Image (cartoon, rainbow, N blue to C red):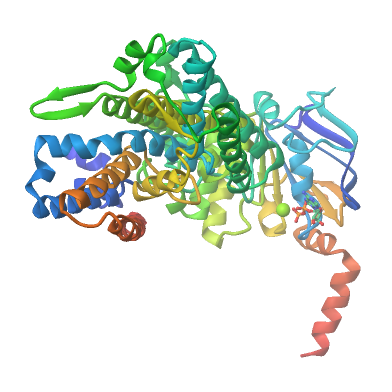
Amino acid sequence: MSGAPLLAVRQVEKRFGSVLALRGVSTSVAAGEVTCVLGDNGAGKSTLIKILAGVHRPDAGEYLLDGEPVRLSGPREALDRGIATVYQDLAMIPLMSVWRNFFLGSEPVRGRGPFRRFDVAAARRTARAELAAMGIDIRDPDQPVGTLSGGERQSVAIARAVYFGARVLILDEPTSALGVKQAGVVLRYIARARDRGLGVVFITHNPHHAHPVGDRFLVLNRGAAVGEYAKGEVTREELTTLMAGGAELDALARELARGE
Amino acid sequence: MTTAEAARRDERVARVSPVRRVLVRPELGSVVGAIVVFAFFAAQSPVFWSVSGVSNWLDPASTLGIMAVAIALLMIGGEFDLSAGVLTGSTGLILVTLATRYGLDVWSAMAAGLVFALAVGFLNGLLVVRTRLPSFIVTLGTFLMLQGLNLGVTKLLTGTVQVGGLRQAPGYEGARQVFAASVPLAGGDFRVAIVWWLAVTALATWVLMRTRAGNWIFAVGGNEQAARAVGVPAARVKVGLFMTTAAAAWLVGTITALRFSSVQANAGIGQEFTFIIAAVIGGCLLTGGYGSAIGASIGALIFGMADKGIVFAGWDADWFTFFLGAMLLLATLTNSLVRRYAEEVRR
Ligand SMILES: Nc1ncnc2c1ncn2[C@@H]1O[C@H](COP(=O)(O)OP(=O)(O)O)[C@@H](O)[C@H]1O
Ligand SMILES: [Mg+2]
């Protein structure tokens, strides 16, 4: 099922002043596949996906879309090229209703000239139908997004990206703030998006979430790639060890063992 | 209700009653406030609710309302404009000065005032989005600069602190008909500014609720970064909002100048907070992302009623600010309580 990569980065680097947030990282994602990016807090995961999403421009390295090197001018261009991102911290506008959020930035319009207006009825109807099609059951599309649970919010954001014809879906820690059951719900939507043929980049610091859905695993530590593995090449335990930097975890294990 | 209908309805939605639908509107606090204030002053003096009384308090409400609506849009978009009050003075001064001392007809002088206002709004917006400084500070700067300019230039040109004589300028009568006429109706004397106020409120409401720009205004005020990330042109929205506020200031400055035919160099100063207060009474959050144009209009109505009502009741006008302070606290308290209640039930 693995084809030519939709999106790839080669040896990208990003600095913030004197902080080298990312150095020499390469990865790719193909249609109908899930690439997981794992790493502890501060490993550079969000920085990497902000490069993929066009928010940051890499200071070095290549960005390839369908094999062609590109330079994105910003998130709008990334969106127009079919790369949709659901951010960890800035997914939606809490005070706005579900349907207003669903169409934010890509509102359907009707009418001409000065009478061009937001087709509110169509937006309400479509949002409800699309959410239902993804198996997301929102009680009332008029309710403010702030009143949804974390899992529901992520699910709405995923459904939105799928609806707007994303080819690549980037998710920044969609499950990290969620309970076990809610995380399961979001993982199911990730699998559903993948089955619809999207390439998914799934960022997490939880190997238990990554391992069941991932086709490829990139492990980051302190801004650098520790390794990249295909499904079957690596176990969940190995991922855990890699993420923490093996030696550190061994040391921790010994330290905790003494206290018993 | 048919069975099919019942099945389609989600059992977790405890049918949202019409009452609750009303309660979650941002303008609720102001509507309650307006009714209370009306009842209160109507009980004090029968003149208050006579036709001439009504036309009397609609007059200050109208010009304030135009500004409050514009400021409400800006506040929903997450910004403040402290220069809006003094800008009503600046545009009035420009109109009178150009039409009386530089030979322009009134319409051209008005156009010049509009260009100036839009330039100030554009500059305010540009400074805010480029520097990312709080608009409170940026527009405080423009406020002080305009205040200085208004006084300095007026004194330089006239040697006094006012310009006048607009009545003699060519085109005055036509412009006055459009912006500052008064229409006798059923014993009252209604200002045409009331029509402008209603039109501005209707237009702003339509833009907010039924256009893409409206969706973007709520979004940039609610969470600018999230809005940007889905492709909302946040900078353009904000600059547009500052220019809209400036255009409203021009409209009010023009209405006032045409009405009195003269403008004081300190006109409009001190009004900037009144606009914000009216918008907040009308349900705007200080933190942005929430509010309503109709609410701001009703906030202005409360101001108008209190302003004239105190006079009708025969009290000292000094009580006005005390009264406003109490209104502000009450309305915001109602708003926050209602919002909490509404969100609780919706979970
Ligand atoms: N805009 C920024 N300015 C300065 N430093 C940043 C910025 N964004 C991220 N960093 C730094 O880069 C490093 C990686 O951060 P991030 O990519 O957010 O990590 P993760 O998402 O894996 O937790 C951190 O040390 C962080 O402080
Ligand atoms: Mg992160």
- How many labels were placed on the picture? 0
Q: Residue at x 68, y 43 (%)?
A: B132
Among the 4 quarters of the image, the one containing residue B129 = top right
In the image shown, does A246 or B27 lie closer to the viewer?
B27
Does residue B135 appear to the left or right of B40 in the view shown?
right
The image shows residue B273 at horizontal and vertical percentages of 45, 48
Among the 4 quarters of the image, the one containing residue B231 = top right
In the image shown, does A240 or B180 lie closer to the viewer?
B180
The image shows residue B143 at horizontal and vertical percentages of 57, 41
Q: Residue at x 27, y 47 (%)?
A: B307
In the image shown, does A129 or B65 lie closer to the viewer?
B65
Q: Residue at x 52, y 59 (%)?
A: A181
Does residue A115 appear to the left or right of B78 in the view shown?
left
- Judge whether A3 appears above or below B272 on screen: above
Instruction: Say if residue B215 shows up in the picture.
Output: no
Does residue A29 appear to the left or right of B32 in the view shown?
right
The image shows residue A219 at horizontal and vertical percentages of 82, 52
The image shows residue B59 at horizontal and vertical percentages of 26, 35
- Judge whether A207 appears above or below A165 on screen: below
Q: Residue at x 87, y 57 (%)?
A: A222
- Judge whether B234 appears above or below A226 on screen: above
The image quadrant where one finds the C terminus of chain A is: bottom right
- Judge whether B181 appears above or below A175 on screen: above
